[in-house]
Image (spheres, coloured by chain):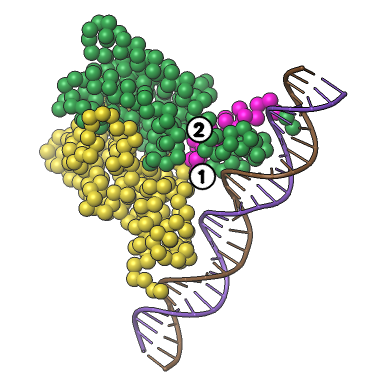
Chain colours: A green, B yellow, C brown, D purple
DNA sequence: ACTTGATTAAAACAAACGTTTGAGTTTCTC
DNA sequence: GAGAAACTCAAACGTTTGTTTTAATCAAGT
C-alpha cells in the first residue's frame, strides 16, 4: 500500500540498474519490480524515464559539484592571495578526490560513480545531454584554472590533455571492480586512496608532459 | 529485388547507427530502413542483432589487430635483437597510431572508431563481451611489453596506468568531432597526426611518471 | 528450359516498452 | 469527520521490438 520511501527506492534501484545495464537496456518494469513498487509510480513521482535518470544524477551530482567547486575556488583564491599561479596538483586533487571518494562502499554511491562514468562515454545521447546541463560550468572552470597553472602549454594542447584526463578518470569511474582483463600477478582489488594517488600521478605527469 | 551488396550495406549502416545511437537504442528497423533492405535480411545474413554487431566489429577489428600485433612484435623483436628492453614510445605508437588512423575521413571507419570507443565503456554488457573475445590477447601482450619497457615500475601500478591510458584513448576514439564542451579560443578541429602525437606524449608521460 | 540454392519480401508472432487512465486507498489539514 | 491532496494499483493503450514464417523472385549451373 502506501510506502514512505517509494521515491527513494526508485532512485536507488534506478541508479544501480542504469549503472549496471545502461539506460536504454534497463526497462521501467525491471526497476519497479526490483524496487517493489508499482509501474505507475515512476510517472507519478518523476514524470518519465528520462526525468528519473535526471533525478538519479542530480541527487548526488549537485552536492558533489558543490564540494568540487568549493575546493577549486579555494585553490584559486589561495593562488590569488599569494600572487602565484594555482597549484596544478591541488586543482586536480580538488576535482578527482571527492569524486573517487564515491567509490568507497560506505558512500553508498558506487553505482552512481559507474553511471557517471558511462554518461561521460555517451555520444551526445540522452545521458550526455542531461549530464552537461549540470556539469558545463565546472568543466569550464577546471580547464581555465589548469591553463593558469600551466601557462607555458598552449591552450589547445591543454584542452586535449584535459580531455584525455577526463577519459582516464571516467574509465576508472566506470570500472569499479569490474576490470575486463586481469593480467597474471596483478591484484586489482586496491585501496581507494592508493588508486586516487596513482590517477593523480598519472594525470599530473600527462598534463605537464614536456612539449 | 536482389541486391549485390545487401550485406555490406547492412554492415555500413549498422556501424554508423550503433556508433551514433548506441546498440540498445538502435532498432533493426532503423538500420534496415536506412540501408534500404528488408528487415528479414538481418536474420538471413547474420542470424541476430548481436551477431550483426559482432560482424560489424570483426570486419575492421580483425585487420586492425593484425597490424597492431605485427607492429608490437616488431618492437619486441628489435629489443630482443639488441638485448635491450622494448622502447616504450614505439610500443604505444604501435598500438595507438593504426587505431587513430581510422579517425581519418578517408578511412571510412570513423564511426567504427567511435563504436569501439563505446564498447570500451560498456560495463560488461553485450558489447564488451563481443569485443573481449577479439581483444584479450592484444591487451595482454601490450601490458606485458609495457612491463618490460618499465622494469622499475611495480606491475600493479603499471596495470592501473595502462588502464588509465586505455581510458584516455577510448575517450578520444568516441568523441570524433563531438566534443561536448568547447572552451573559448580552442580549435577542436585538429589534425590527426597532431592529436596522435599529443595522445602519445600524454600517455608516455603518464606511464613513466615518477614514483 | 529446368532445377536448385540463394535471396528478398511482407506478414505474422509474441513479447516488451513507456505512458496513461480511472478507481481505490492513504495521509493531511481544517 | 469531511474534504482535498497525495499516493498506489491494475489494466489498458498504442507503439515498438527482434525473430520467424512462407511464398516469391533471382541467379547459377546443367
Percent of width and height locating residue B105: 24, 50
Q: Residue furthest left?
A: B82
- For image coordinates 17% across by 38% down, the residue present is B194
Give the magenta range.
A3-25
Label 2 near label 1: C-beta < 8 Å?
A: no
Other-residue count near label 1 (Cα within 10 Å), few / some / many at <14 / 14–19 / ≥20: some
Chain containing the residue with disc 2? A
Up the image or down, A25 lies above or below A102; here it is below
Distance (Cα) linking label 1 and label 2: 17 Å
The circle drawn on residue A25 is 1
Chain containing the residue with disc 1? A
- For image coordinates 65% across by 40% down, the residue present is A39
Q: Nearer the viewer, residue B82 or A175?
A: A175
- Say what secondary structure mark 1 lies in: loop
- For image coordinates 36% across by 23% down, the residue present is A138
Percent of width and height locating residue A45: 62, 32
- For image coordinates 70% across by 28% down, the residue present is A3
Residue A7 within the magenta-colored segment of the rendering = yes
Q: Quadrant of the N terminus of chain A?
A: top right
Q: Quadrant of the C terminus of chain A?
A: top left
- In this rendering, does residue A185 appear at all? no
Q: Residue furthest top?
A: A82
Percent of width and height locating residue B174: 33, 41
| Mark 1 or 2, closer to the camera | 2
Percent of width and height locating residue A50: 52, 38
What residue is shown with label 2?
A54
Q: Quadrant of the rendered structure where residue B60 is?
A: bottom left
Residue A24 within the magenta-colored segment of the rendering = yes
Amino acid at each position: 500500500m502506501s510506502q514512505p520511501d517509494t521515491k527513494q527506492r526508485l532512485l536507488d534501484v534506478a541508479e544501480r540498474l542504469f549503472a549496471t545495464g545502461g539506460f536504454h537496456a534497463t526497462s521501467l518494469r525491471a526497476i519497479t519490480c526490483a524496487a517493489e513498487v508499482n509501474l505507475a509510480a515512476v510517472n507519478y513521482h518523476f514524470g518519465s524515464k528520462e526525468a528519473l535518470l535526471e533525478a538519479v544524477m542530480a541527487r548526488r551530482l549537485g552536492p558533489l559539484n558543490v564540494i568540487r567547486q568549493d575546493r577549486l575556488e579555494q585553490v584559486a583564491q589561495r593562488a590569488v592571495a599569494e600572487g602565484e599561479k594555482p597549484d596544478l596538483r591541488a586543482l586536480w586533487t580538488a576535482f578527482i578526490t571527492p569524486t573517487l571518494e564515491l567509490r568507497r562502499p560506505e558512500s553508498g554511491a558506487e553505482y552512481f560513480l559507474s553511471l557517471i562514468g558511462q554518461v561521460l562515454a555517451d555520444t551526445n545521447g540522452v545521458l550526455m545531454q542531461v549530464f552537461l546541463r549540470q556539469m558545463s560550468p565546472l568543466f569550464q572552470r577546471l580547464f581555465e584554472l589548469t591553463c593558469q597553472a600551466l601557462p607555458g602549454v598552449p591552450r589547445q594542447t591543454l584542452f586535449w590533455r584535459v580531455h584525455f584526463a577526463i577519459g582516464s578518470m571516467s574509465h576508472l569511474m566506470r570500472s569499479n571492480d569490474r576490470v575486463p582483463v586481469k593480467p597474471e600477478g596483478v591484484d586489482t582489488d586496491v585501496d581507494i586512496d592508493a588508486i586516487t594517488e596513482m590517477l593523480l600521478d598519472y594525470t599530473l605527469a600527462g598534463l605537464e608532459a614536456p612539449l
